[in-house]
Amino acid sequence: MKKYSFRLQPVLNLKEKALEDKRLEMAKVIKLLNDLQIELDTLKKTYSSYRLQIEEISLSSEALNVSELATCNSYMSTLEQQMQDKQKMIEHTQRVLQVKQNEVNEALKEVKVLDKLKETQSKKFYDAVYKKEAEEIDDIVTARYKVQQV
């Protein structure tokens, strides 16, 4: 019996490779997004700890250390700016991730279409082969019957 050969197999292979590449790109963006979120969380914790430190300095019964308060406030302003920058980076990365997800979905659709075409053509091919074999068997049986009749 003949073996089926999908004539668009090289195209399917390319589409599958492109899909895998798109998935890897998306995974890199997800990793970057996770790293940025961890950095933002770290900045928020640092900011909170400095806020607590300022509250402790303000509430202490000792004389207020103005230079220490000014230093903490200055650093907290820097942290606020860094948190805003990280948040903007996260939002940008989320938009990039959405684009990458759309690209992966489109590549997946292309692969699925070719897989479905391959499956359909394969089924037609094997149906035709089985039909031809059945006809040949029928011809052989008919020929034997005719030989036995003579």
Image (spheres, grey):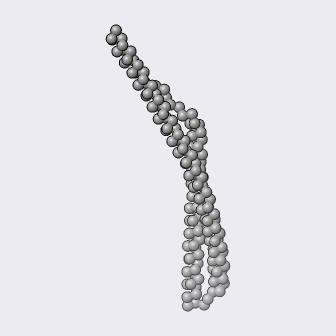
Determine the residue located farthest toward the top in the rendered image: 150
Residue shown at 65%/69% (left/top)? 85
Farthest residue to the left: give it: 149
Q: Nearer the viewer, residue 59 or 95?
A: 95
Position of residue 120 in the picture relative to residue 54 (left or right): left
Give percent across and percent down for residue 96: 62, 59
**Residue 69 sits in which quadrant?**
bottom right
Q: Position of residue 83 (x, y in %)?
A: 62, 71
Q: Nearer the viewer, residue 7 or 14?
A: 7
Question: How many labels sit on residues?
Answer: 0
Q: Is residue 104 above or below residue 117?
A: below
* Residue under the point 55% across and 41% down: 114
Q: Position of residue 50 (x, y in %)?
A: 58, 78
The answer to whether residue 75 is visible is: no
**Residue at (56%, 52%) from the top-left corner?**
105
x then y, percent, for residue 63: 60, 90
Quarter of the figure with the C terminus:
top left
Q: Is residue 95 visible from the viewing direction of this image?
A: yes
Q: Identify the residue shown where x is 54% and y is 44%.
A: 113
Of the pair 126 and 95, the residue shown nearer to us: 126
